[in-house]
Image (cartoon, helix red, strand yellow):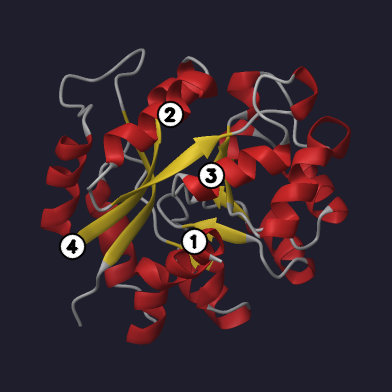
Amino acid sequence: MKLDFFDCNAQIGRYGVPQPEAYFTPQELLEKLQPLGISRALVYHSYSKELHPVEGNPKVVEETKGLPLTAAWAALPPATRELPAPEDFIAQMKAQGVGAVRLFPATHSYCIRDWCVGELFDALEVHRVPIFIDAAQTNYDHIASALESHPRLRLIILRPSYRCDRFVYPLMEKYEHLCLETSNYVGNGGIESICSRFGSSRLIFGTGLPFFDPGFAVSHITYAQIDDADKQAIAAGNLEKLLTWAGE
């Protein structure tokens, strides 16, 4: 079965320490994705991470127009008022076709416990906005705290390590909307075990481009010992469902 992939984890834009082979533009990203059967991607802009969301969020919308790319915006704690209040921020996301929120708490100097981002998470939970956060940007204790306060949060952990199961399984048992991105979830039989225990809906395909090669990410799903329907759900279907909030 030929799978249609939808990447949930890709960056566009020039960043601080690029590698010689790195791409910068959306067109260059698509040139890397499409030969591997990855037809679409959810992308954030490097400026949102390394400069400021005020700079990068408008840029990702501008640069993805007319392309098979969905913009993701970086968010910040509301207290500093660097961005619009959460309800206004979400309204602007909808108006501009932005599909998801990216969080970079380690890079942007905050944490995802309720005292810091509770007001933001209240709004994101109500509107069912998917939130993507790299495992290296936080820790599982903070993730557990966020989910305890906001149990219906659509939270996707990006690039969890192959040794994360003892952290992740207890959380998955309690919180039905917690998902893992697959590009670094490489434990032997890990994909199969998640599908058997919790269902394929808990896994979202991503690549981590431009920092990681997409070939392994694709083969990891293509050759998993699971049903074709589950493979396609992981490859694209689960992300498609997460993004439907913006059209409602």
The disc, 1 or 3, on the residue closer to the chain's N-terminal end is 3
* Crowd band around label 3 with a 10 angstrom C-alpha radius: few (<14), some (14–19), many (20+): many
Q: Amino acid at mark 3?
A: Met
Q: Are marks 3 and 2 in contact (CB under 8 Å)?
A: no
Instruction: From the image, state whether disc 4 or disc 2 is nearer to you.
Output: 2
Residue holding disc 1: 243
Residue holding disc 2: 58
Q: SS of the residue at dot 2? A: helix
Q: SS of the residue at dot 4? A: loop
Instruction: From the image, state whether disc 3 or disc 4 is nearer to you.
Output: 3
Compute the Cα span from label 1 to label 3.
12 Å
Q: Nearer the viewer, residue 25 or 3?
A: 25
Q: Amino acid at mark 1?
A: Leu
Residue holding disc 3: 93
Q: Is residue 73 left or right of residue 18?
A: right
x and y percentages locating residue 122 in the rendered image: 80, 49
Q: Tell me the residue at 18%/62% (across/down).
A: 37
Compute the Cα span from label 3 to label 4.
28 Å
The disc, 4 or 2, on the residue closer to the chain's N-terminal end is 4
The disc, 3 or 4, on the residue closer to the chain's N-terminal end is 4
The image quadrant where one finds the N terminus is: bottom left
Residue 83 sits in which quadrant? top right
The disc, 1 or 2, on the residue closer to the chain's N-terminal end is 2
Instruction: From the image, state whether disc 1 or disc 3 is nearer to you.
Output: 3
Q: Tell me the residue at 15%/54% (across/down).
A: 34
Residue holding disc 4: 37
Q: Amino acid at mark 2?
A: Pro
The disc, 3 or 2, on the residue closer to the chain's N-terminal end is 2
x and y percentages locating residue 146 in the rendered image: 80, 47
